[in-house]
Amino acid sequence: MLGSDILDVAIGVVFVFFIVSILCSAIREGIEAWMKSRATHLEQGIRELLHDRDAVGLARQFFEHPMIYGLYAGAYQKSPTSTWWPTALTRGRNLPSYIPSRNFALALMDMAARGPVVDQATSSPISGAITFDDLRANIATIGNPPVQRALLSAIDTAQGDLQRAQKNIEEWYDSAMDRVSGWYKRSTQWILFAIGLSAAVVFNVNTLTVVDYLYSEKTARQALVARAQVVAADPASPSTTYNLARHELESNNLPIGWGNRAAKVAERTQGRWDVLVMTTLGWLLTAIAASLGAPFWFDLLNKMMVIRSTVKPHEKSPEEASEDRQIGSAPPPAAAAGSAAAPPAPPGAAVATTAAAAPSPPPPPAAPVPPDQVDGCDVGVVHITSDEDLPAAEGGVA
């Protein structure tokens, strides 16, 4: 049916997008491991959160605190940024790309209660444990009025519970990091688009060519859908490595690469300019798809597999006839014929008959009843028995 064929083509295209997205994401992670731009976004986010954009006061003291200093190697050096916010290609240094919210809250509470400077006096065990009252009374030692105001709000809403105050500071940090993650993802999407466009050109992944090929080649379409079904059933598929993803892309006999597929595209178009325009458009569609990321296409692939299982249920089990059609239907002509003779067997054929399968002979005619023994219950006046003359009922409903 036409609808199921189009659905299979869509599943095949989504599967190709998923594999290409894995390739682009792997390349992006390789660039990230070298550039360390995620660490620059985190550092800049903490600078904004602590109201120390130039990292000369509280932000520097925060990164030099023992709770944070152990998360990276070497001394703290702020990341150089030419603008107020780093890009996805800003080169980072030795700073961490992730700081747990618990470490952030404990470090900030320790700096508020004992002061931001780490020395022998504040690190002595005789300094005493941090209490809720000490935390609120010594909050001015931070020396940063905006951060002090935020900490006072977190402390006052805890209503005397020190753990609740810590939880409030963690939530304050997490909400700020959600915004930083959004900025990083937006800048990463542009990098993924550039990587996707490069991959589309290098591997010649033309979306329009893939669609035309899958629609016209039924065998290749069915094989690709079967492979997509196997991949979609594996939850670990989005974490596939670069080499496995490239092998998957090249082993499905798709019109990808710079082999004989370029001639096939030229045959299906009218002229050179049509080939150039359609090829460029196909590359752009591939790049846009790669910028959405592999998790997006993996989720979409699973949803389309569910839809396919409902659209084409007869592939798993044959359709059953409706019960309404069976009830009250006329018997088949062979059964209605009754005593009609069966067609003769062909010459030389062995006819196997059984006693159960042979037709039963008609019953003999009933013998005539003498006139003196005829019951006259149904002749003449019919006598209706009254209810009082009926025998008593046994069993049933009283």
Image (cartoon, rainbow, N blue to C red):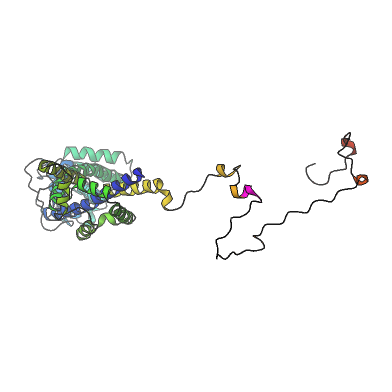
Q: In which image quadrant can residue 274 be found?
A: top left
151, 46: nearer the viewer: 46
364, 73: nearer the viewer: 364
Residue 199 horizontal/vertical position (percent): 15, 51
> Quarter holding the N terminus?
top left
Q: Residue furthest top?
A: 381
Asked whether residue 97 is in view, the answer is no
> Quarter holding the C terminus?
top right
- Name the residue: 91% across, 46% down: 373
151, 339: nearer the viewer: 339
276, 190: nearer the viewer: 276
Number of numbered discs? 0
Q: Residue furthest front?
A: 347
Q: In which image quadrant can residue 311 be found?
A: top left
Quick check: is 3 in the magenta stretch? Answer: no
Above or below for 9 versus 153: below
Residue 126 horizontal/vertical position (percent): 23, 56
- Please state if 384 lies on the left or on the right of 223 as rendered: right
- Please state if 347 lies on the left or on the right of 216 as rendered: right
- Please state if 181 lies on the left or on the right of 332 as rendered: left
Residue 299 horizontal/vertical position (percent): 31, 48
Residue 112 horizontal/vertical position (percent): 21, 45
Asked whether residue 300 is in view, the answer is yes
- Name the residue: 73% across, 54% down: 362
Instruction: Tell me which segment is drawn in magenta.
Output: 335-341
Q: Residue furthest right?
A: 372
